[in-house]
Image (spheres, rainbow, N blue to C red):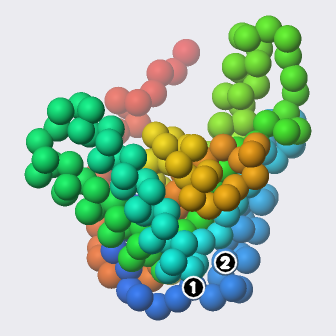
Amino acid sequence: MSNFLAQIKSRRSIRRYQPALISSEQIELLLEAGRWSPSAHNRQPWRWAVIQSDATKITLAQAMGAKLRADLTADNAPIAVIEADVARSYERITKAPLLLLLCLTMADMDKYPDPKRAQNEYIMAVQSCAMSGQNVLLMAHSMGLGACWMCAPLFCPTVVQTALELPADWQPQALITIGIPSEEKAKSRNSIEDLTLYR
């Protein structure tokens, strides 16, 4: 028990990796961990796109970068800030040995005629996908790999769908970069007392 908690507490978001490739066996273990997460109604609404090709990474990074640049330009952000953000995004995507794109599908979720219950069902699917992603992050850490959850696909889902030619019902949720770490991180957490109510 204490060893498992130590694994959870020592996991960090790693953004810089060694160039070594991730093996197919390692990828299989990561996906297997994600597959066994809990989900609403056990519908397993997550879908994973595995991205290893440099050409595909570049295509995705360029498409997402163009959207980011357009959004920041519309916000009247300074040009230097825009270019720095776009360059940082491009580097994170293209320099990671492995990208796992986490997507959501509503294909097997319950259907409701009213907006309120339909929205709740959608949130349940989002939560289910997030749990699958957390399993992948913890599995990566247990394997000695670094990983980082990027929420950027939420801001440009159509761009990501088009760049990767995803099925129409696959809704991009997060991009997880994975590789052998080339950096170390130390982070703190708020106290349990600050985060908890007992009733």
Bin the neighbour count of mark 1 within 10 Å (Cα to Cα): few under 14, some 14-19, many 20 and up: some
Where is residue 56 drawn, in percent x and y? 54, 72
Q: Secondary structure at mark 1?
A: loop
Q: Say which amino acid is labelled 1.
A: Ile
Residue at screen point 66% across, 43% down: 171
Q: Secondary structure at mark 2?
A: helix
Where is residue 113 drawn, in percent x and y? 85, 11
Is residue 196 something that shows in the picture?
Answer: yes
Q: CA distance from mark 2 to mark 1?
A: 7 Å
Question: Of 89 and 12, which appears nearest the observer?
Answer: 89
Residue at screen point 41% across, 62% down: 62
Question: Of 157 and 133, which appears nearest the observer?
Answer: 157
Give the quarter of the figure containing the C terminus: top right
In the rendered structure, are the residues bearing label 2 and label 1 in contact, judged by CB atoms less than 8 Å apart?
A: yes
Q: Which residue is mark 2?
A: 27
Q: Which residue is mark 1?
A: 22
Give the quarter of the figure containing the N terminus: bottom right
Q: Work out whether 116 lies above or below 166.
A: above
Is residue 6 something that shows in the picture?
Answer: no
Q: Say which amino acid is labelled 2.
A: Ile
Query: Which of the marked residues, 2 or 1, is nearer the chain's N terminus?
Result: 1
